Image (tube, rainbow, N blue to C red):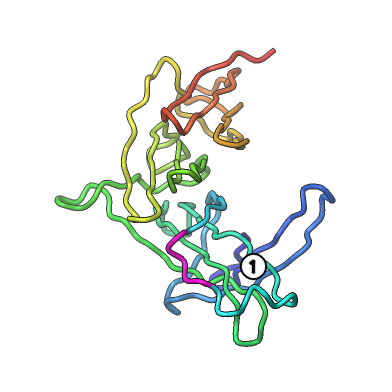
Amino acid sequence: VETTSATQDLMVEKFDRNDLRHVEFYRSIFENPEDIMDTEGFCAACLEDESAPAAAQSWEDPAIQELPCTLWVFGGQDLATFRNDVWRGRPEYSSAGDIVYRWNRFTFGTGAPGSPAAPAGRRGAAMFTDKERGKLFIWGGTGEEGPLDDLWAFEISSLAWEKIDLLPSFSPPPLSDFVFTQAGRRGFVWGGTTTDGMDNPYLYEFSATGPGFIRTETA
């Protein structure tokens, strides 16, 4: 997912890991024309949305290609603040017959009396998915007060957040500039810099079944 300035010029690219090349480009439309996705440092993942409406075209038509996955985007930083918005991009067929992504924005307050729980705004968070239970997990990132080490679960059916308590002895400390990836139901956080300026020497494995982390020393 790429954004260019505040013009709502949002492009989705499909990358073939086998051929190591970009194979498709999809344009975007916004459910609310006033929404602008003008952030950097967001995290994104694919997670199928069972509540999405069925495609209008018949799958029996060989000219109709299979729709790509639903995209979920969290957080980032704009010119004013750190964000905690969630964006959902659903693929659909346009009237011209091409595939486009339709984006909806979901906003959440934090700390206000009576408001639902939600993570603080941040950039550079790790995002993991649990396809079986329809959940996204957000860990860490950098917010107004610096690096974070909290874990949150987002249920896509209810659009609700839940804070997950972690065991400090097994979980990553607050980190900046780390890298993360996911393989199956396991996620990994590696590297980065601690709040005291030290390099993080550990690899942390995330499991959605816990959910939680375990720490592994690297050579």
Q: Residue furthest front?
A: 60
Question: Could you say where residue 194 lies in the image, as x and y percent from the top left?
Answer: 51, 24
Q: Which residue is located at x 48 percent, y 43 percent?
A: 132
In the rendered image, which quarter is residue 156 located in? bottom left
Residue wearing tag 1:
11
Identify the residue at the far left of this view. Answer: 113
- Frontmost residue, 84 versus 55: 55
Q: Which residues are magenta?
A: 50-54
Q: Give the quadrant of the C terminus.
A: top right
Say left or right for 30 vs 200.
left
Figure label count: 1
Please name whichever residue, 13 or 41, is drawn nearer the observer in this view of the structure: 13
Instruction: Specify the principal SS of the magenta part.
Output: loop
Q: Amino acid at mark 1?
A: Met
Residue 159 x/y as whole percent: 35, 55
Residue drawn at (61%, 74%), measured in percent from left and top? 100
- Where is residue 155 drawn, in percent x and y? 37, 49
Q: Residue furthest right?
A: 19
Q: Quadrant of the N terminus?
A: bottom right
Vertical relation: 144 (above or below) 186: below
Q: Residues within 10 Å of mark 1 (few under 14, many from 20)?
A: some
Residue 178 location, quadrant: top right
Q: Does residue 52 belong to the magenta stretch?
A: yes
Residue visible at 43% across and 57% down?
86
The picture places residue 12, in percent across and down from the top left corner, at 64, 64
Q: Is residue 95 magenta?
A: no
Q: 146 left or right of 126?
A: left
Secondary structure under the numbered disc 1 in the rendered image: strand
